[in-house]
Image (spheres, grey):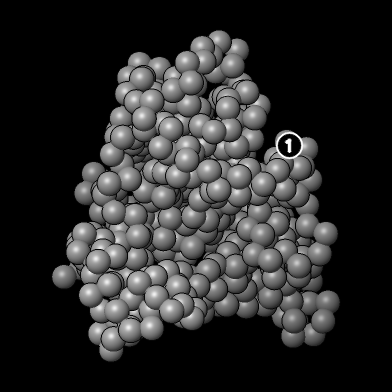
Amino acid sequence: MSGPIKVLLGVLLGLVVGMACHQFWTPSAWQSVGVGDARAFMAGAVNPANADATLAAQGVRFVIRVNALIGDAFVRALRFIAVPLVLFSLIAGVASLGGVGGGAGGGRGGAGGLRALGRVGGRTLGLFAVTTVIAITLGLVLANVIAPGRAVSEATRAGLAEANASAVSERVAQAERAAADVSVWRLLLNVVPTNPFDSLARGDMLQVIVLAVLVGAALLLLISREQNKADAEGGSGGDDHAALPGLSAVTIARACEALGVVFITIGGWILRLAPIGVFCLMARTSADVGPEVVRGLAALCGVVVLGLAIHMLFVYGLLAVGVARLSVRRAALGLLPAQAVAFSSSSSAATLPVTIRCVRDNLGVRERVASFVCPLGATVNMDGTALYQAVCAIFIAQVYGIELSIGQQILIVLMTTLSSVGAPGIPGGGIVMFITVMQAVGLPMEGLAMILAVDRVLDMVRTVVNVTGDAVVAAVIDRWEPGDESMANAGR
Ligand code: ASP
């Protein structure tokens, strides 16, 4: 059985097991093994209601804890390699734009290499912006046409408002803390690192990218100087002509490349555990959430999923097959492992090492393009989140009978774009940013109670779209880049 199929099987099995647990392991099942307060029992807190807990109850708790441990360890392991992987591969990738170090390029020299970097960066950001605006527009059109908000009964609204009141105030407080970071100026300022080691330690991906690009660009320039000097002296170049004997810019670029490969190898080991990791994550989420959360808000979920599916099929499908010239089979199957991890972890940041691997190994994208586009995308490109927020904004307005003018809808486009750029690639990262959209458009905060009810489930689906978008843009950018080591352009 191939790797992607095993990972997919992990997701499906986890879903089935989790749903079965949700269905059958109810409070009365806990009571039958002597547990009156399951929450306290699971937390290990003392509660007289659990005084009669039997050995079977301890066993169930043990299994649940082991399951959580494996799932969390898998996500932590992925996050552990993300920062060094991006740092080293990107430094090597940028340095290789001159034709040395990473082995790519073709002797373009320092200025040519920097131009290539500007071109890749500009095209990537441009494509991210275009796909995001298409996603938001699609969300707005579907939400206006289908009007999911009209399907919500007054009873459902009141019930959800009561059930989620405390969650709403918690998220609003979080959003208020984050609000200062959401202005365009703040977002731009945050791109500049004040201390590169601090950026690495905090895992601030945007700052890590800036750091890697700067170091790579400096190496690129130094390498071309070393080459020019070597050529002028008629020597062979390399270490003999370095500022420090034995340590040239080429050596450093090659060392970074080798370190990148080291972390890719570690990533390969972690990925072997992916079927088990995604099984554990899926089982836990579906056991916690269960199918009934969707009831009452089925119309909202339907519109979001429909929009995400259309975006995946038509926008990404067209880009992947029509522009990047991937075969349909390769485009459909190549990203399965990344999509399965995204679905079960709800985190594009945690999925990043898997995304880079799939894009490189399965879609044939060059290393330097993959290690530039994917981390940048995981941080700033979230089409799924943007579409979801656009639908939710219209949905809340419809539930509360608020007519949104065209001006307000344009404001939604601007705010959701900004909010999807600022949203962290973690579970629930989008919902906190969504509050700033609600505030800007003037939507009632109680509306959040409804969204929160289904946010966990829809987070899984939109994260798949976020990750797929990064991968497809990487394939397109690779296609547009002049080919040298064009494994990318051959045999797609
Ligand atoms: N969970 C999403 C991601 O990591 C972000 C969000 O929409 O909440 O891509």
Name the foreground residue: 211 vs 423: 423
Q: Secondary structure at mark 1?
A: loop
Residue 420, x across and y down, in percent? 56, 40
In the image, residue 73 lies at what x, y percent? 45, 76
Q: Nearer the viewer, residue 483 or 86?
A: 86
> Residue at image x 75%, y 49%?
190
Quarter of the figure with the N terminus? bottom left
Q: Is residue 266 visible?
A: no
Q: Residue at x 29, y 54 (%)?
A: 290
Q: Is residue 271 left or right of residue 168?
A: left
Local crowd size for mark 1, using a 10 Å CA cut-off: few (<14), some (14–19), many (≥20): some
Closer to us: 206 or 48: 48
Q: Which residue is mark 1?
A: 183
Q: Amino acid at mark 1?
A: Ser
Residue shown at the point (35%, 60%) measured from the top left: 288
Residue 348 lies, in percent from the top left, at: 48, 55
Residue displayed at 41% across by 50% down? 456
Q: Nearer the viewer, residue 358 or 483?
A: 358
User: In the displayed structure, would residue 315 be above or below residue 88?
Assistant: above
Residue 225 pos. (x, y %): 78, 63
Judge left or right: residue 52 versus residue 107: left
Left or right for 315, reference 118 = left
What is the residue that sits farthest to the left in this orientation? 1
Extreme residue in the front direction: 48
